[in-house]
């Protein structure tokens, strides 16, 4: 009976695995790195939307709209990341619990966060996401996976731009208005 269960499980797994010329080790390593990136993208997306929904103060409209734009940009990354993992022969995230196990970006469940602290935290989180994507890029380079590396390069640029906007929007104004 145990033997037939093992065979059934192998058959189920093989039914969803897509072959790749990069090999099984590359598929496992790159898929693992990209699933970690995906978990952080989802965590950052939800935190960005949390702050979008709860921002207040004199710059409400500007911050609210900027965070909405950034949330949309993050969400737009999720499907291509997950589909890239599948193209590599891997499997991807299946649940919120799976995201929680892999994410390195901390949640923020505070009842109130000052807008300047929101921007600073999101800026740091985007920098952290950039670092994680660079690690994934190095793994792609190791296995000559130019397709995934190319996508990561675009996402790094987007993430650096989000961090830059958050940094600039959060700067303190001096007495001269600068």
Image: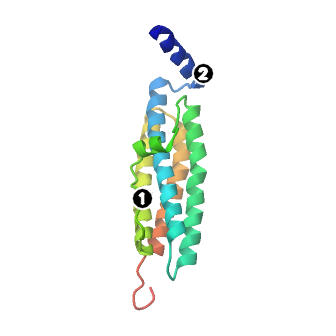
Q: Which residue is at 59% across, 32% downward?
A: 87
Q: Left or right: 173 with respect to 93?
A: left
Q: Quadrant of residue 172?
A: bottom left
Mark 1 touches mark 2? (CB < 8 Å) = no
- Residue 4 versus residue 168: which sits nearer the camera? 4
The circle drawn on residue 92 is none
In this view, the residue farthest toward the bottom is 176
Residue pointed to by mark 1: 125
Specify whether residue 4 is in view: yes
Pick whichever of labels 1 and 2 is earlier in the sequence: 2
Q: Quadrant of residue 88?
A: top right
Q: Which residue is at 41% across, 70% downward?
A: 113
- Residue 42 versus residue 149: which sits nearer the camera? 42
Q: Whole-percent x and y of residue 33? A: 44, 39
Specify whether residue 147 is in view: no
How dense is the environment of label 1, judged by Cα within 10 Å: few (below 14), some, or many (20 and up)?
many
The circle drawn on residue 15 is 2
Q: Whole-percent x and y of residue 115? A: 45, 74
**At numbered mark 2, what does the secondary structure look like: helix, strand or loop?**
helix
Give the quarter of the figure containing the C terminus. bottom left
């Amino acid at each position: 009976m145990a033997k037939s269960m093992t065979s059934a499980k192998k058959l189920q797994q093989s039914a969803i695995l897509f072959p790749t010329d990069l090999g099984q080790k590359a598929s496992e390593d790159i898929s693992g790195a990209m699933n970690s990136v995906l978990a952080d993208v989802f965590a950052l997306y939800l935190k960005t939307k949390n702050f979008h929904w709860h921002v207040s103060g004199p710059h409400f409209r500007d911050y609210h709209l900027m965070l909405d734009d950034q949330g949309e940009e993050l969400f737009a990354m999720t499907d291509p990341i997950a589909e890239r993992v599948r193209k590599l022969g891997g499997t991807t995230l299946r649940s919120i619990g799976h995201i929680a196990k892999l994410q390195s970006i901390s949640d923020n469940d505070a009842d109130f966060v000052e807008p300047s602290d929101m921007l600073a935290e999101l800026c740091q989180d985007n920098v952290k996401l950039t670092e994680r994507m660079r690690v994934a890029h190095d793994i792609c380079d190791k296995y000559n996976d130019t397709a995934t590396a190319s996508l990561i390069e675009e996402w790094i640029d987007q993430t650096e731009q989000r961090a830059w906007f958050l940094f600039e929007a959060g700067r303190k104004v001096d007495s001269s208005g600068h």
